[in-house]
Image (cartoon, rainbow, N blue to C red):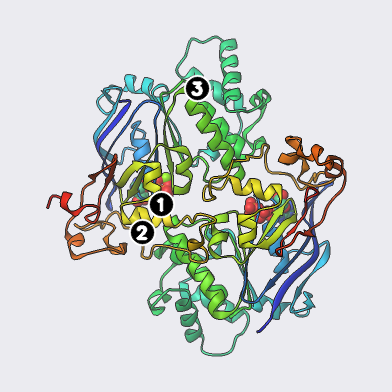
Amino acid sequence: MLLSVRDLTVTYVTQASAVPAVRGVSFDLESGASLGIAGESGCGKSTMGAAMLRLLPSSAHVSGEVILNREDVYAMPFSRLRAVRWAGISIVMQGALHSLNPVRTIGWQIAEAIELHNHDLRDHAVRSRVGELLEMVSLPAKCAKDFPHQLSGGQRQRVLIAMALACNPQLLIADEPTTALDVMVQAQIIELLQDLRSRLNLAMIFITHDLSLLSTVCDRIAIMYAGRIVEEGPSGSLLSGPAHPYAAALAAAFPTIGDHSSRMTPSGLGGDPPDPTDLGNGCPFAPRCPRVEELCLGYDVPLIDIGDQRKAACIHVEPSRVAL
Amino acid sequence: MKNSTLSVEDLKVQFSRRREVARAVDGVNLDIAAGEVVALVGESGCGKTTLARTMMGLEMPKSGEVRFNGSPLGRRAMREYRRKVQMVFQDPSGALNPRDTIYEAVAEGLRVHKVAGDEVAQVAAALSKCGLRPPERFFNRYPHEVSGGQRQRVVIAAAMVLEPQMLIADEPVASLDASVRGEILKLLRDLVDQHGLGMLVITHDLGLAWNIADRIAVMYLGRIVEIGSCEEILEHPKHPYTQALLSVVPESKRMEQQILTGETPDPLHIPKGCRFHPRCPLMQNGEADRLGIADRCRGADIGLRDVGQGTRVACHAI
Ligand SMILES: Nc1ncnc2c1ncn2[C@@H]1O[C@H](COP(=O)(O)OP(=O)(O)OP(=O)(O)O)[C@@H](O)[C@H]1O
Ligand SMILES: Nc1ncnc2c1ncn2[C@@H]1O[C@H](COP(=O)(O)OP(=O)(O)OP(=O)(O)O)[C@@H](O)[C@H]1O
Ligand SMILES: [Mg+2]
Ligand SMILES: [Mg+2]
């Protein structure tokens, strides 16, 4: 197993409040596999992604285990952690499109990422590696001399992916890599990521709020709600037959073009997104759930195995299996 | 209110930058009738927002006309027009003043247009029409005190309070979570069905069009290149650009992906001939040569032509 996450919990503690952003997440990822994580804004996707590499601010209190190649990321000394960042796992952060240094060339910034881990590489070796990485993300070599503002959004996203690949990671975490991009450019970036996955045998965690994207990119999908995974399973069966009512509502929000039952009947979910500081004791989705029952209000269902490599956290999925 | 239509005729809008001219809207014809939803789709930068702003009288056309119920949009009738045709703008963060309560945000239009009648009652009616019920509970709240979906409802209520005959909505759900998206689309469709207004919805989301639109217009580099009923366009797209756009949308049925290479095209340099030809799959796979049209694709501009089923397409291959 490449990565095992066990009961990961992250709480942001400030003077005013404690925000439980991730509440006991567990999952496994094999090498070369891909997992998509979807859920609405604020459900904890980015917090979970950043927690994999201990990249959270000091206000974040973390417990649980993140085991990469049998080594616990949270137990390793900082020197070891530095080696694991970039070379073991690397992240393309959400919104990083705007974080490239405006006064440095693209080539300089990619070289910096390479040298971070290979201090003794000679100049020409670094330069040829920059060229190799640009080619890998299908950018012309002359882009190395450009500044960020001279590139389009799609090209800048390719640069960020090139930087993330600089040290040959085993796992790439891409947090909303296509969100600000146009449909056609989005398709280009997704094609690139899939191509890299198969060429480099790269494992990937793809974070997005757009569930419809994940079917083309990922083997498995996890749906998050209020800091928990509420359903997890193979992409195909999860999308065609979601078990958790929240997953069902998300899937229904993206109609199939050509399916006449969804024509002129947009489907949505009423109610407000959950307030992480005020979740109560029951199932956090209960206030918005079309299938809510008395029982849901007082019992917070854990993620239970429902067969066919699927799991869901809902009393309706298979009541007999819910240990009461 | 019956049979009101908003139409544009051969509309061109240009922006000059230094010594170059961006032809952002480059000859568009379009009608929107009362009771229908028309979706305008196309890549970023193809001129959708510019077209909408010109229809609102916020940009001056270089040539061509915007007409409402037959009469051209001019300075004299502008006040009246601005009441009957409302727009929901693309950038949601700028749409509401954070220091105004929701009541103030919705009442503002009534005050600007000096609308007679009971202001409180009109604000309450608009809010509840947009699903914010009971409306009084929202009066004194500030934008940051409601959810994103509710904020978008407030923006729509601020447009609906003037009882417009036409609504132009620029990317009305792009900033919203998937779970909330359907609710807003349902609201927009209901406004059309129950109050008979006409609506132009600008979006790059073809699934959204499938959800609520009667007709679809596909825009490419300042022009409409295909227009017709929603079913025809999404189930039997004719223009190679529409086909490519549809093939990359995750919601479309499994069709072979045609990912167009290159970045979004540039209105400063519109290609000669068919404006799509440098990216056209038919040119790249030799199909245009086989059909003997490649020279025309490269050299002859082409307008919309009827191809039956109420669809009109601008392509030499059809
Ligand atoms: N530095 C921080 N301090 C305090 N709270 C935070 C911090 N960062 C995030 N949060 C809170 O933690 C929760 C989860 O945030 P997170 O950014 O992980 O969500 P997300 O699922 O990535 O959302 P989005 O789709 O909007 O990116 C939210 O309630 C958020 O407000
Ligand atoms: N005020 C302006 N001055 C100069 N150029 C402009 C102006 N407004 C728009 N443009 C240019 O006109 C073209 C069309 O822009 P427009 O905003 O209409 O596109 P759009 O289809 O709405 O794109 P998006 O999907 O990104 O909103 C673009 O090339 C844009 O840069
Ligand atoms: Mg995030
Ligand atoms: Mg726009």
Say which chain tag 3 marks. Answer: A
Q: Are marks 1 and 2 in contact (CB under 8 Å)?
A: yes
Given the current orientation, which residue lies at the most extreme left position? Answer: A324
Rendered residue at 61%/23% (across/down)? A135
Image location of residue A76, percent across then percent down: 27, 23
Disc 3: which residue: A166
| Residue A273: mark in rendering | 2
**Quadrant of the rendered image containing residue B313:** bottom right
Query: Which quarter shows the N terminus of chain A?
Result: top left
| Residue A41: mark in rendering | 1
The verdict on a common chain for dots 2 and 3 is yes
Image location of residue B38, percent across then percent down: 64, 66
Does the residue tagged 3 have its C-beta within 8 Å of any atom of ligand 3? no
Relative placement, left or right, of A281 versus A152 is left
* Amino acid type for the residue under numbered disc 1: Ser
Say which chain tag 1 marks. Answer: A
Say which chain tag 2 marks. Answer: A
